[in-house]
Structure formats: C-alpha cells, structure tokens
Amino acid sequence: MSELVLLAGLFFSAFTSATILPGSSEVVMLGLMTQGIGLWAIWTVATIGNVAGSVVSWWMGTAILRFQDRKWFPVGPEKLAKAQGWFNKWGKPALLLTWLPGVGDALSIAAGTLRVHLVPFIILVGIAKGLRYAMVLGGGDFLGVDELFN
C-alpha cells in the first residue's frame, strides 16, 4: 500500500478520534512506524487530523447548543457542564487538556458554546494534541515498535 494511502488513513483515524466517532489514531500511528514511514510525517498528519476533528467539535458547540437535550447530542449534560466549569475556572488554558480521553471532546464543544475564538482554540488544541502524539511516537520509538514487527 502506498505511503500516501496509509497517511490518509491515519488522518481519518486521527480526525474521528477527536469527534464523537470512534477512532484509534495511536494504534494506527504505531502501525505506520512498522511500515518505515517517517516519524515527522506520521506526527504531522495525525496532529493536523486530530486538530481538524476538534474544530468540528468546536463548531458543533457554536452551532447546535440548542439541541443539547437531544439523545443524539455528542456530549451529555454532565460532561458539558463540567467542561464549561473548567473554562470558567481556568479559562482558555483548559484547552491544553483536550488530549485527555473522554473529556477532550467535551472541552472542544464547551469552547464552542462559550464562543472561544477559533485561532486561540486551534493554537492551544494544536499544542495539546501535538504533544500527546509526540509522546506516543517517542514511546513507540523508545520501545522499538518499528523493530518488533520487522
């Protein structure tokens, strides 16, 4: 399979991982390490895809808050209230926690509901997601994941 197709799959996985859809970008990243794809390419594609997915969640917060009581709304009222509480307490730096499983999507949606401007949102979420992926790749490299399967 071509490197471009593999990286497109990683982008999709990272994108969905930052939305309500399931994704397993970390597993895909480690798998791509075994294919000889460069770490910088993997990190860049995963980070951009994950931040793009977070922007969709942010947009959902700005556009559809009026539907928060519906069953299909991606974040329950408790998680949304908790995330909004973090924003009230910590402000925009709370977005540095968007890498956390379970709460990251809620923080992105809460940022939209609270009308956080898009540019600071992208910068802070990009830092958070980029650091997480750097740690995953660094850990995989340290453990020799690329050599385990070759």
Image (cartoon, rainbow, N blue to C red):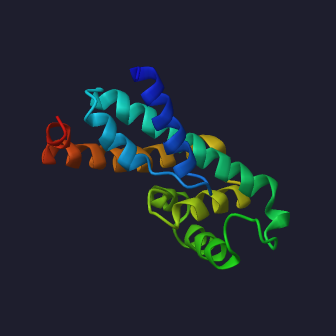
What residue sits 60% from the left and 75% below the top? 85
| Residue ID at (39%, 22%) | 3
Percent from the top left, x then y, of residue 29? 35, 41
Residue in the foreground of this view, choosing between 9 and 45: 9
Which of the image's four quarters has the C terminus?
A: top left
Picture quadrant of residue 127: top left
> Relative to the observer, which residue lies in front, 136 or 85?
136
Tell me the quarter of the picture where residue 68 sits. bottom right
Q: Is residue 102 above or below residue 55?
A: below
What x and y, as percent, mark residue 102?
Answer: 51, 67
- Residue 69 drawn above or below residue 130: below
Image vertical order of residue 1 relative to residue 18, above or below = above
Q: Which residue is drawn at 59% across and 76% down?
A: 82
Residue found at x 78% / y 71%: 71
Percent of width and height locating residue 104: 52, 61
Q: Which of 23 and 115 is in front in this view?
A: 23
Give left or right: position of 134 versus 81: left
Count of residue discs: 0
Quarter of the image with the N terminus is top left
The x, y position of residue 76, in whole percent, is: 68, 74
Please state if 147 lies on the left or on the right of 11 as rendered: left
Q: Is residue 10 left or right of residue 31?
A: right
Among all residues in the image, which is located at the extreme right? Answer: 66
